[in-house]
Image (spheres, helix red, strand yellow):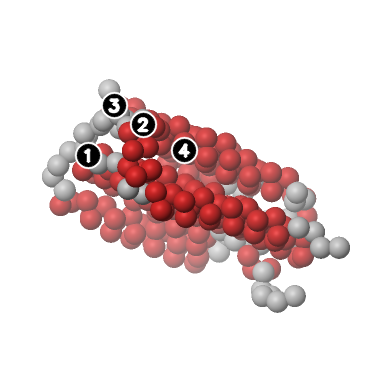
């Protein structure tokens, strides 16, 4: 299998994630886009791990998974707290950085 | 045969990813993202990264997406206003996304070797992880604990 396959899949996922990150104003969908960006990096790490024949890339993917879980937990807590405060999950409504 | 499955699940994950990002209904987007993650787990399986494929489905599909959908349930969708689409932003985002994709794709042109699918199960991953990468592993466990405490502290209702 050619490594170009992994590059194409990873770059397209990254493009989709970047598009969502720029265009959408809904915080939850922005988080979805962030997850897609993280996953595009994971795909490339797995591909390179198999290309070079060692497992370090796959171990790094494992760490990325753990950090993504932590990011999702804290990010969602912030979004829920903001929703309670403002009643909205639109990024343009989050203008105040103090309370 | 591996390649056929790779292409199938790669296309599937891209389609699900597009639906997840562009869908107006957030719940539908979340479920599409679940499909995207499960397809990516299958992609990992086609090159033999079995442990990662399983962990991808369990952690991303089972934990993260459920967390998102759970947080969505605390919100009232009827009061959320629909977002207006600005063509300028869509054009800028599309152009930037296409440029980045092309740049990443161009970076792959110099590689001549080919990927050799080889099975890497939990046992193969465990040896380097618990010897060579023991310190990062412990650091990640502390990070997860801090994130859990932080999430509870932020999300707590203050009376």
- Same chain, labels 3 and 2: yes
Q: Check disc 2 and report its element: helix, strand or loop.
A: helix
Q: Closer to the camera: disc 3 or disc 2?
A: 2
Chain letter of the residue beneath label 1 in the structure image:
A
Q: Check disc 1 and report its element: helix, strand or loop.
A: loop
What residue is disc 1 on?
A53
Position of B137 with respect to B31 (left or right) is left
What residue is disc 3 on?
B2
- Same chain, labels 2 and 4: yes
Indicate which disc, 2 or 4, sits on the residue closer to the N terminus.
Answer: 4
Vertical relation: B99 (above or below) A43: below
Farthest residue to the top: give it.
Answer: B1
Q: Are marks 3 and 4 in contact (CB under 8 Å)?
A: no
Vertical relation: A9 (above or below) B139: above
B83 or A1: nearer the viewer: A1
Residue B4, given in percent of the width and then of the height, sits at 30, 27
Say which mark, if any, is on residue B56.
Answer: 4
Is the residue marked by circle 1 packed among few (<14), some (14-19), or many (20+) residues within 10 Å? some
Position of A51 with respect to B49 (left or right) is left
Residue B21, given in percent of the width and then of the height, sits at 52, 49
Q: Residue at x 53, y 54 (%)?
A: B142
Position of A79 with respect to B91 (left or right) is right
């Amino acid at each position: 299998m050619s490594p170009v396959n992994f590059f194409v899949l990873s770059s397209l996922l990254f493009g989709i994630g970047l598009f969502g990150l720029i265009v959408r104003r809904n915080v939850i969908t922005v988080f979805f886009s962030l997850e897609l960006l993280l996953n595009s990096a994971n795909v490339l790490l797995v591909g390179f791990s198999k290309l070079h024949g060692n497992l370090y890339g796959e171990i790094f993917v494992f760490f990325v998974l753990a950090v993504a879980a932590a990011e999702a937990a804290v990010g969602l807590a912030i979004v829920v707290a903001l929703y309670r405060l403002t009643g909205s999950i639109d990024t343009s409504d989050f203008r105040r950085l103090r309370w | 045969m591996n390649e056929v499955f790779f292409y199938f699940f790669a296309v599937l994950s891209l389609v699900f990813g597009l639906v997840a990002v562009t869908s107006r209904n957030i719940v539908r987007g979340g479920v599409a993202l679940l499909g995207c993650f499960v397809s990516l787990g299958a992609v990992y399986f086609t090159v033999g990264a079995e442990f990662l494929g399983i962990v991808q489905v369990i952690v991303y599909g089972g934990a993260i997406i459920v967390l998102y959908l759970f947080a969505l349930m605390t919100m009232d969708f009827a009061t959320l206003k629909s977002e207006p689409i600005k063509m300028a932003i869509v054009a800028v985002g599309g152009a930037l996304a296409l440029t980045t994709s092309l740049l990443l794709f161009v970076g792959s042109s110099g590689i001549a070797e080919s990927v050799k699918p080889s099975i890497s199960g939990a046992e193969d991953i465990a040896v380097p992880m618990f010897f060579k990468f023991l310190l990062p592993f412990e650091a990640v466990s502390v990070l997860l604990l801090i994130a859990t405490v932080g999430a509870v502290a932020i999300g707590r209702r203050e009376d």
